[in-house]
Amino acid sequence: MPRSALDFLVGTLFFGLSLLLLSDFVRAADRRPPLRPSQTAAALPPVTESATQIASYDLDAKLDVTEHRLSGRETIRFVNHSTGPLTELWFHLYLNAFKNDKTLFLRSPFGAGRSGDKAHEYGYIDVKHMFWVEQNQRDLWPDRDRHSPDDPDDETDLRVPLPEPLAAGQMLTLELEFEDKLPEIVERMGYSGSFHFLGQWFPKLARLEPSGQFAHFAFHAQSEFYADFGDYDVALDVPEAYVVGASGSLVAERHEQGRKHLHYHVDNVHDFAWTAWDHFQIRRERIADTDVSVLFPPHQDRNAEAELDSVRFALPHFNALYGRYPYPTLTLVHPPESASNAGGMEYPTLITTGGPWFSTLGGGHFIDVVTTHELGHQWFYGLCASNEHNFPFLDEGLNSYAEAEALEARFGLGSVFDGYGLSVSSTALNRAISAARGGDEPVAEGAADFASFRNLGALVYSRTATIMTTLARVYGEPQLRHALGRYARQFRFAHPTPSDFSNVLKDELGQDAATVSSRALFERGTVDYLVRDISNAPETAAAGVFDGPNGRQQKKPEPVHSPNQYTSRVVVYRHGSLELPVDIELICEDGSRAFQHWDGHGFTHNVDHSGPSRVVAVRVDPEQRILLDDDFSNNAISIEGGSAPRALERTLYVAQTLLGGLGP
Amino acid sequence: MNHALTRRAPSTARVVAITLLWITRTLVSLLVAYPLVFAITSTGLVSDPDRDAVLFRPGALLLLELLRTAAPALIAALKTSCLLWVLSAIIALLPLAAALDLLRSQRMEALGVQLTRGFRLCPRFLALSAITLLAQSALVLAASLLAAALGAALRGHDERLVTLAPLLVFVLAALGCAGLGALLDVARAALIQHELAARSALLQALTILRESPRDVLFGCYPSVTGSAFFALCAAWFITRIDLSQPTTRAIALAFVVHQTAVIASIALRARWLDGALTLAARVPSSRD
């Protein structure tokens, strides 16, 4: 056989074997653990079955997919549930955030919104009239304020004075007509080609607090939403070829002259979002007594399956932990890559995911992370409905913990990535992000108050999750699970505040945990445990000059024990304001180990040890319970000093391989 | 029968060549690795009684902590390592020349003699490497431009096509680079075989490629795919070794696995270099 033919055969054999190995790697990384039943928290309060209906909406919308315009009619039934009369209403016209570059949302020179993208084509909403039905169809709209308070360039937060006060307990009915011009997709709103996503697309009442004040705010790029519960009855009119996904249940459908008329209904929610695209594929499955639909782009079946798999695990898991999901439907929307800004968002009974077609290849769990996160929002946003503008940590923060907990219950320590010999957990990732910006700003501040969205992301999402994980590891995981379970049930449909959350923590985990949580959330509380020195000395009898009844005696230092006993001292320090109890592990020369506990009070703690062997190494918090610790690199000390034989071996091999592959 | 057409290096010479290449590659790689390892060792994380086993624990809590707390030091060390890597790649030309000479002569001379000869040929080796690197860079640049243009042209089409088409361009460019690497090896072999100048060696390599393209391209094929295979095998074994345990046995095992892969790939390369010498021996040289 000629040499070239032999070389070709050998080379091809190696090539084939390499492909086999590579596919084994990829398959191993893709392998998913079987679904396991979730742990539940015992003796929790029952959930409230329905919300008090404050603001209910009937919407009728026709979508023009060529001009990217929407014509709408709206009927609002609003009850003044405060204790006093109302003389004004506040409306959010969120779509006006994309009207021009001077709006509060878009005027940042560094890009706007969570995605950092500016609008490429602008969008806005025009309200044509607002009739007060009970007041002889009087049009309230001409008397509205023309811009958001103190902001002449913004029209997302408008006051509408009432010509007659609305008494406490009285209902008002408003009829509106409006027209939307959709922007090219920005912040989960607009279009990309024939794909349309409509979130915050209609005039919406601000939430009326029990005090009688409306919780209104101009739409800030870092902020999300806050609204009252109600029933939504929505009629949608789209081209016949379009596939629609929407909040709630489809109750009727008819086709007429190339158009499709869809009627959706949903009770006990505070928002309604929908999407329409002529390329959507659909998968449907009944999971935990809920009709789940996944709308996804062509050729993304693997992503759709991964999303369903996430729901198969997380929906029963969250049901068990935070109370049963009360709606009959759940819709997942996976937008096309060209509209990725529509991804990763939550609305009542509808969530958006996202990611390129190859997201499930390799060991990354991106699809699972985003799906689990957005599903968790059905509780920590959808059902609890806290104020996302003023206290984003109550939704994004608690939900990030819920997401990490669920992912680790499912995937173990490889919850973010698991493959090729490396595993990365959500908890580790949250801790790394949190520690990087831990003391920058308080966690519990308004979304618009954060210096940047990166800070908001690190503090609201990652640091809140890290605070919760630390509380779980220090004060007990069952206790924290019970606390969150109680919070989610007790405040379902109740718009909880930070003090509601703190009170639950105090009841369930105790005063110390509540103090730590409060300092960490509200006061930029930080902590860093560190150990600096190890001192060892043989135990000897007291030496020196002693005057006694028998005169003066001089004693030389002599061991009191044979073999020697050693007295050792280690000093542990605590920096920062969070006083968390911590374990300290002492490792002796003979291999024996001793543990001591420090309640964390005070700034230093002397750890004294006596034994037949010297203390040669110390670890503070050996199980890494305190994930809020600012710096793990000062938590251990060893008399031998540090060394990195594994890193040396690995780095040497990488350098050798690179020299072989790319070198001479 | 022309002896040059059937020449094979005696197994002893090949073993010595492999050993020489492995030892020098290991030594220069230690030099490259040192700044990074020093940066890791200087963090407190490896002061743990379990030393750097903590960096290999599942979940990557302390690995991420290392990246977070030591990022500036690691980036500085990485830059130094990159510079040292370039220097090492140049230094490694000397043992390569010596190994080629050893394979050509088919007899053991004093290693010093062969290294001296290698040292003398090194500038010409360097010139050949520079020319090849230039050609490979041009190829990668052209591939990047083509991939970018392709990505833009395909926007709005099937997402898989948009992703895979530019990737395919890069794969083709990588194959082209591998082909240029094979040509470089043949030129080096011609240079050793006939004591040519760099330009003449390159021209001779091109002549050989024109006359026997299959011998050149398929000749290096087992070396390239075999090295990839052994690297993957090593990775497969390594994922089954628990380095998070504080025992030295796991480190020793990982070292053995990795070095076996390195030696195996060097052995395949030595086989290919021997083949390149055979190819270079076919064409009588025209000295300039």
Image (tube, coloured by chain):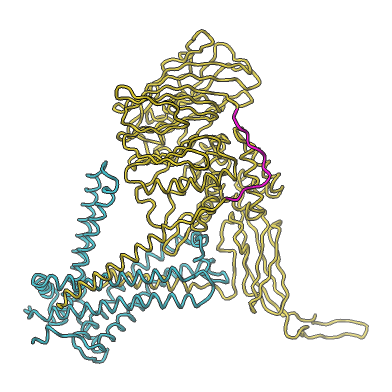
- Near-viewer residue (A101 or A82): A82
The quarter holding residue A441 reads top right
| Res. A577 in view | no
Whether A44 is among the magenta residues is yes
Q: Residue at x 34, y 41 (%)?
A: A297
| Res. A519 in view | yes
**Residue A541 falls left or right of residue A113:** right
Q: How many marks?
A: 0
Residue B211, image x, y percentages = 8, 72
Q: Residue at x 66, y 60 (%)?
A: A582
- Near-viewer residue (A279 or B38): A279
Question: Main structural element of the magenta stretch: helix, strand or loop?
Answer: loop
Above or below, B200 relative to A312: below
Residue B68, image x, y percentages = 48, 58
The quarter holding residue A586 reads bottom right
Quarter occupied by the N terminus of chain B:
bottom left
Above or below, A246 relative to B184: above
Picture colour for chain B: cyan
**Residue A215 falls left or right of residue A574:** left
Q: Residue at x 7, y 81 (%)?
A: B284
**Residue A599 falls left or right of residue B174:** right
Looking at this rendering, what residue extends furthest in the right direction?
A549
Residue A509, image x, y percentages = 69, 48
Highlighted magenta segment, given as a residue range = A38-51
Q: Which chain is depicted yellow?
A: A
